[in-house]
Image (cartoon, grey):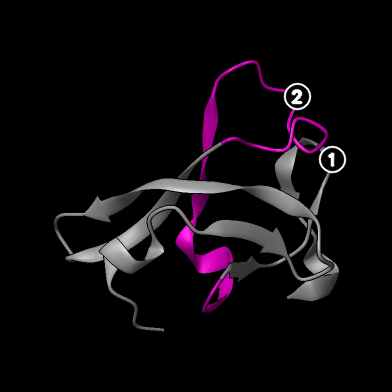
Amino acid sequence: MHADITSMLGLDVYTQKGIFVGRVDDAVIDPEQGIVSGLALGNINKELFDHKGKGVVIPYRLVTAIGDIILMRHLTRNGQANREDE
């Protein structure tokens, strides 16, 4: 899946089941491979993450679609990817 990094900034991220996860603040780049390895999210859904920080990084491999929003595999509470959706 190819997308311009700047086009992803500010997009809302939802699970495939329609649950809001957060908003893209930045991308994490793997310098050795030259690919996006994760998305740094802010404004996160506190019901998904037992985490007191302002944001989280989700692995880019969980992203399934990018358009007006970003879709990712569904997460269970505590931010664990749901294996049923793989």
The secondary structure type at the circle numbered 1 is helix
Q: Nearer the viewer, residue 58 or 9?
A: 9
Instruction: Give the position of the N terminus as an image quadrant.
Output: bottom left
**Circle 2 sits in a helix, a strand or a loop, which is it?**
loop
Label 1 to label 2: alpha-carbon separation? 8 Å
Range of the magenta residues?
Answer: 43-68
Q: Residue furthest top?
A: 52
Question: Does residue 47 show up magenta in the picture?
Answer: yes
Horizontal relation, residue 20 to residue 2: left or right? right
Give the residue displayed 24% in from the left and 55% down from the top: 30
Q: Is residue 76 above or below residue 82?
A: above
Read off the residue under disc 2. Answer: 50
Badge 1 vs badge 2, beta-carbon distance below 8 Å: yes
**What x and y, as percent, mark residue 69?**
58, 69
Task: Using the rendered view, name the quadrant where residue 22 is placed.
Answer: top right
Q: Which mark is residue 77?
A: 1
Which image quadrant for residue 68? bottom right
Q: Position of residue 41 (x, y in %)?
A: 50, 42
Looking at the rendered image, the quarter that the C terminus falls into is bottom right
Question: Label 2 is placed on what type of residue?
Answer: Asp
Q: Say what amino acid the circle numbered 1 marks.
A: Arg
In the image, residue 2 sits, relative to residue 70, either above or below, namely below
Residue at 61% x, 58% y is 13
Q: Position of residue 85 (x, y in %)?
A: 79, 74
Tag on residue 30?
Answer: none
Q: Earlier in the sequence, mark 1 or mark 2?
A: 2
Q: Residues within 10 Å of mark 2 (few under 14, many from 20)?
A: few
